[in-house]
Amino acid sequence: MKIQVSVARQLLTLLDDDRQVLREYRVSTGKAGVGEVFGSFQTPRGRHLIRAKIGAGAAENTIFVRRRPTGEVWSAAFEQEHPGRDWILTRILWLSGCEPGRNRLGRVDTMRRYIYIHGTPEHVELGTPGSHGCIRMRNADIVELFDLVPAYTPVEITED
């Protein structure tokens, strides 16, 4: 299996080993565009892999902070109490770059930048860039993808 993320199309595609499309999901990548430098809030390009899967069995809308469930569940009322927060919900697929100097090691290390594929509140618009560099998905979609892919699944992020 392989995951392809098209920044231009704001689309995540899950492919089987014969490159046949298994699933397609609308996503949201970095509002600041693409780039690899630490602190840029951009979505990193190139070859990655899923280094860790976090949140197996968590309830939908479980809130994660620093990759740990907080014990809270997102709701509109909870969001009003915490405005401006970048919500990481339901599941996390933590990405690690595979290309030294491009998205691995030093100031361009995807994993040290904490770039994930993760769930987001239902009201958040997908199909347009809006994240802080991560790849946001609907909660039901991230649960499905999480259950379909093993750790170390390749992820290719492209601008096309």
Image (spheres, rainbow, N blue to C red):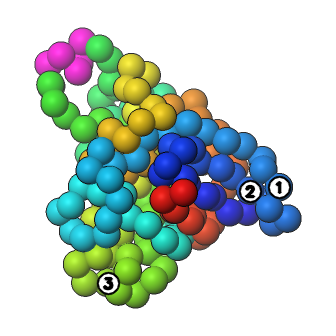
Residue 142 visible at all: no
Q: Secondary structure at mark 1?
A: loop
> What residue is rendered at 32% in x and 17% in y?
75
Q: Please report the residue visible at 17 percent of the width from the left and 63 percent of the height from the top.
A: 39
Name the element at disc 2. Answer: strand
Q: Can residue 83 be seen at all in this image of the molecule?
A: yes
Q: Which residue is mark 1?
A: 20
Q: Marks 1 and 3, how far apart in space?
A: 32 Å
User: Callout 2 environment at 10 Å: few (<14), some (14 to 19), or many (20+)?
Assistant: some
Task: Please tell me whether residue 137 is drawn above or below residue 121 in the rendered image.
Answer: below
Based on the displayed image, in which of its 4 quarters is residue 115 positioned?
Answer: bottom left
Q: Nearer the viewer, residue 155 or 128?
A: 128
Res 111 quadrant in image = bottom left
Mark pair 2, 1: CA separation: 5 Å
Q: Which residues are magenta?
A: 77-81
Among the two numbered marks 2 and 3 on one chain, the one whose residue lies closer to the N terminus = 2
Other residues around mark 3 within 10 Å, as few (<14) / some (14–19) / many (≥20) = some
> Residue 71: x, y in percent?
31, 33
Name the mark on residue 15.
2
**Pointer 3 residue:** 105
Q: Are marks 2 and 1 in contact (CB under 8 Å)?
A: yes
Question: Which label sits on residue 103?
Answer: none
Task: Tell me if mark 1 has few (under 14), some (14-19) or many (20+) residues whose alpha carbon lies within 10 angstroms of its own.
Answer: few
State the predominant SS element of the stretch in magenta. helix
In percent of width and height, residue 78 lies at: 23, 18
